[in-house]
Structure formats: structure tokens, C-alpha cells
Amino acid sequence: MPTKGQFKAGAKARSVAQRKYNGSDVQKKRRAERNAARRAAERIHGKKALAGKEVDHINSSKNGSLKNVATRILDKRKNRVLGAKKSHTGNSRK
């Protein structure tokens, strides 16, 4: 098994690139902001109200900060459909 920060010998290029991207400082910060938004929503609405739901950032940019961006609670499927419509540029992975 590879040590932390290393990859398997047969790791695909896409997998390696995705792990590098997810491990970047910018993406770590955005993930922390998304997690903080969910915790804030849980404090306001309760965990039961968010069960099976996601916290959606309304009108957020793809690479800016998520702080002070309005949020709403959406069903998981609805949130994924909306996200695909916002950022769809064509299916490059068929």
C-alpha cells in the first residue's frame, strides 16, 4: 500500500490529477467553507431537517470564496441537477 501522499503504481492519470486538485489549498478552504455552511444550517434548522438534504450556495462563483453567500436547503437530487445545469459545458467523459 502506498504511503500518505503517494499513489498506487497503476493509478490512472485522472485519479492522480483529481487528488492533486482536491488537495490544493484553495480547494481545502472551499471545502471547509462548505462544511461550515452545513454546520450553521444544522444549528438553525436541526439535523433532522437536513437529513438527506444538501446546503446549496445560491449564486456562488466556481472559484471564489463561499463566505457570506446565501444558502438554501435542497433535496440532494435537485441540487445536483441544478449544479449540472449551471456548469454544463458538454460531456467530455463518455
Image: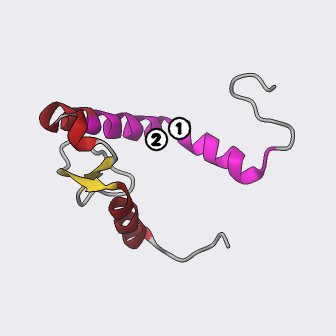
Query: Residue 28: image x %, image y %?
Result: 45, 35
Identify the secondary structure beneath mark 2: helix
Instruction: Name the residue at 70% across, 53% down.
Output: 14
Q: Vertically, is 78 above or below 46?
A: below
Q: Residues within 10 Å of mark 1 (few under 14, many from 20)?
A: few
Of residues 80 and 34, the one nearer the viewer is 80
Instruction: Name the residue at 32% across, 49% down.
Output: 54
Image quadrant where residue 59 sits: bottom left
What range of the chain is rendered magenta?
11-38
The magenta stretch spans residue 36: yes
Q: How is this picture coloured?
A: secondary structure
The magenta stretch spans residue 5: no
Query: Residue 91: image x %, image y %?
Result: 58, 75
Give amino acid for label 1: Ser
Q: Vertically, is 85 above or below 79?
A: below
Instruction: Name the residue at 75% across, 22% down.
Output: 3
Image quadrant where residue 11 sits: top right
Query: Residue 75: image x %, image y %?
Result: 30, 56
Q: Vertically, is 21 above or below 74?
A: above
Question: Which residue lies most toward the top here?
Answer: 3
Q: Are marks 2 and 1 in contact (CB under 8 Å)?
A: yes
Instruction: Name the residue at 26% across, 38% down.
Output: 37
Question: Which residue lies most toward the bottom here?
Answer: 90
Quarter of the C terminus within the rendering: bottom right
Give amino acid for label 2: Gln
Quarter of the N terminus within the rendering: top right
Residue tagged 2: 27
Q: Residues within 10 Å of mark 2 (few under 14, many from 20)?
A: some
Residue tagged 1: 24
Query: Residue 31: image x %, image y %?
Result: 40, 38
